[in-house]
Image (cartoon, helix red, strand yellow):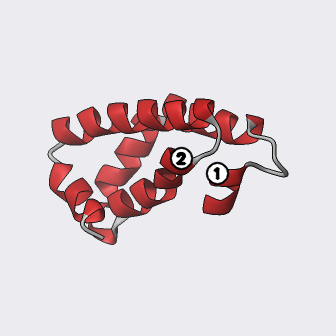
Amino acid sequence: MAHIIVKGLKGQYEPVVAWYQAVFAALKHLLGLMVKEEVNGSVSLLLSTLRPGFLSRSLEAAQWTCRVFGRLGRELQERGLQSAAWEVSAM
């Protein structure tokens, strides 16, 4: 998945951008699931899955990654899950 996010799907980035847009639109639902499954490492799993967008060769995909992480950071802080997010950055 990381390879597709960084280099596109057969060189096309529209599917990658669409995926990040869908993730952004579903963040409230994803956060609800993350809260329920925090003990199972859901925060680190989601952040690790999304992280390759920062390295994407597509500016638009990288911008959507920033939007997702910005909103996610605020929401995680409001729910008291910032320590779980911090653990991912140490990996």
Evaluate whether residue 12 shows in this view: yes
Locate the N terminus by quadrant. Answer: bottom right
Position of 1 relative to 22 (above/below): below
Answer with left or right where residue 88 lies relative to residue 80: right
Quarter of the rendering containing residue 46: bottom left
Compared to residue 36, the image places residue 19 above or below, namely: above
Judged left or right of residue 65, residue 59 is right
The answer to whether residue 19 is above or below residue 67 is below
Q: Residue at x 22, y 64 (%)?
A: 87
Q: Nearer the viewer, residue 74 or 11?
A: 11
- Quadrant of the drawing holding the C terminus: bottom left
Q: Mark 1 Cα within 10 Å, few/some/many (few <14, many 20+)?
A: many
Q: Secondary structure at mark 2?
A: helix
**To which residue does mark 2 refer?**
53
Going from N to C along the chain, the mark reached first, 2 or 1, is 1
For the residue pair 24 and 17, the one nearer the viewer reads as 17
Q: CA distance from mark 2 to mark 1?
A: 6 Å
**Can you give x and y, in whole percent of width and height, for residue 83 in the image?**
15, 56
Amino acid type at mark 2: Gly
Residue, x 79% and y 50% (percent of image)? 9
Secondary structure under badge 1?
A: helix
Few, some or many residues within 10 Å of mark 2 (<14, 14–19, 20+): many
- Residue 1 in view here: no
Residue 5: numbered disc: 1
* Residue beneath the point at 27% across and 68% down: 39
Residue with the most extreme right position: 10
| Residue 72 numbered tag | none
Task: Evaluate if marks 2 and 1 touch, with contact meaning CB atoms under 8 Å apart.
Answer: yes
